[in-house]
Image: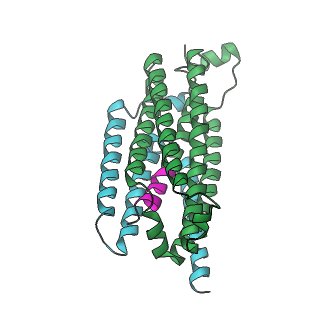
Amino acid sequence: MSGNDKHQHHSGYGTYIIVWLALLAFTSITVTIAGVNLGRYTLFIALLIAAVKSGLVINIFMHIKFEEKIFKAFIALSGFTLIIIFLLTFFDYIYR
Amino acid sequence: MSDHQEAAVHHVHRDDLGAKMGMWLFLFTEVLLFGGMFLVYAVYRYQYPDQFHFAAMELNTTVGTLNTIILLTSSLTVALSIDALQKGNKFLSMMMLVITILFAVMFMVNKYFEWSTKFSHGIYPGSPELLNKPNGQILFFGLYYIMTGLHGLHVLIGMAVLFFMLVFIAKDKVTPDNYVKLENSGLYWHLVDLIWIFLFPLFYLIQ
């Protein structure tokens, strides 16, 4: 149990509130940018902002930053699996 | 009394790390479930970019933005609830859970009005008006209903899970020394938020 205890108090209320404010800021940025015509970069920027927001939620809210390495390996593995599925599908679809 | 002594006295068998690992494995199956749908979305958006843009004009960006803010804030309150319980503040922890559940209700009420408006415009799966539209738009609305619908189902399940946690904390079954159930419920709720973070720009912010 002592192994678990040292992971308890890394984030205070303050950290969570700062992350929440950052998430709200990113939301307003993504809504504002959606109104500007950036052509083909629009989707890329929207997904980039969504990825940054996910990073904040996963690392701080879901505590992954303070967890054992195995959890980080799990996330990396599932992320890579998704990327590979997307790449293979589009490779097939575009060059069919 | 430390956890170790307590375990020895009461013969409690617990594996918090294992419980959390199991939860994460479950979350990955959820990621793959939604991942498959995002893949279908990506291929059809690539095939019908103009029709996806046109169909997305029908969606109400204000409602989508409001629901994004509601879900992000509910993610904050559930994180605060876990933190409060770890610090021994049972009352604050329960208050934060109540607020989280109320945010979830607000999200579903918004969703209800959003869908009813679409229905009243004659846009629902299989409606004559929708079937008269070009293929790309039928696909867009089909994906919109199945993806936000499955996400909404997750919100409902999350509400039920968080309600049980509220009862467990009240009955001291989830305590400052034994809170892995609350942590895992929090993880589920954050996943619901994560999926919405991607649904929101892909459906509501196509201009």
Q: Horizontal and vertical percent for residue B80? A: 42, 30
Residue A52 found in image quarter = bottom left
Predominant secondary structure in magenta? helix
Q: Is residue B118 above or below residue B79?
A: below
Q: Is residue B186 above or below residue A54?
A: above
Tell me what hue chain B is rendered in.
green
Q: Is residue B190 magenta?
A: no
Q: Quadrant of the C terminus of chain B?
A: bottom left
Q: Horizontal and vertical percent for residue A1? A: 57, 27
Count of picture labels: 0
Q: Is residue A24 above or below residue A9?
A: below
Residue pushed farthest bottom? Answer: A96
B31 sits left or right of A59 in the view: right
Which residues, given as a range, are shown in magenta? B195-205
- Residue A22 shows in the view: yes
Q: Compare residues A4 and B158 and report the one nearer the observer.
A: B158
Q: Is residue B101 above or below residue A47?
A: above
Q: Horizontal and vertical percent for residue B153? A: 61, 44
Q: Residue placed at 66% from the left, 27% from the top? A: B14
A57 sits left or right of B123 in the view: left
Q: Compare residues B3 and A64 and report the one nearer the observer.
A: A64
Residue B7 found in image quarter = top right
Q: Compare residues B200 and A73 and report the one nearer the observer.
A: B200
Q: Residue placed at 50% from the left, 36% from the top? A: B104
Q: Compare residues B158 and B66 and report the one nearer the observer.
A: B66
Chain with colour cyan in the figure: A
Q: Residue placed at 51% from the left, 51% from the top? A: B195
